[in-house]
Amino acid sequence: MPHGKYAQCPHCGKIARGEEEIEELFGYRYGRTKPQSWCKECRAAQGLDDDSECGDE
Ligand SMILES: [Zn+2]
């Protein structure tokens, strides 16, 4: 990642470029410091939501 923000969902391969797109498609955790690893759709499909994923690092 040379510059800017970029995220790819390891589950479905969805790509988000830029902070706005990442926030929309993935969401942030830890107070916007780190994008979620999976996109919102995949997390929803797995029964995870923005608030339930924590303490996994
Ligand atoms: Zn996904």
Image (tube, rainbow, N blue to C red):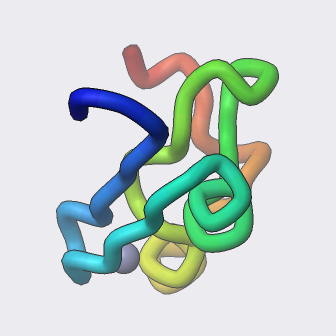
Identity of the residue furthest to the front in this view: 3
Work out which quarter of the rendered image holds the C terminus and state it: top left
Give the camera-side residue of 42 and 27: 27
Residue 3: % across, % down: 36, 31
> Residue 20: horizontal and vertical position, in percent?
72, 58
Location of residue 33 in the rendering, given as x and y in whole percent from the top left corner: 65, 20
Q: Residue at x 70, y 20 (%)?
A: 30
Judged left or right of residue 9, residue 28 is right
Residue 12 is situated, as x and y percent measured from the top left of the image, at 24, 82
Q: In the displayed structure, does residue 25 sit left or right of residue 7? A: right
Q: Quadrant of residue 48?
A: bottom right
Which quadrant does ligand 1 occupy? bottom left
State the count of labels: 0
Q: Nearer the viewer, residue 49 or 20?
A: 20
The residue shown at (46%, 41%) is 5
From the viewer's perspective, is residue 28 above or below residue 33?
A: below
Determine the residue positioned at 78% across, 45% down. 51
Using the image, determine if residue 15 lies above or below residue 20.
below
Q: Is residue 21 above or below residue 31?
A: below
Image quarter where the N terminus lies is top left
Which image quarter: residue 29? top right
Identify which residue is drawn at 64% across, 48% down.
19
Horizontally, residue 12 falls left or right of residue 17, namely left
For residue 56, side relative to residue 29 (left or right): left
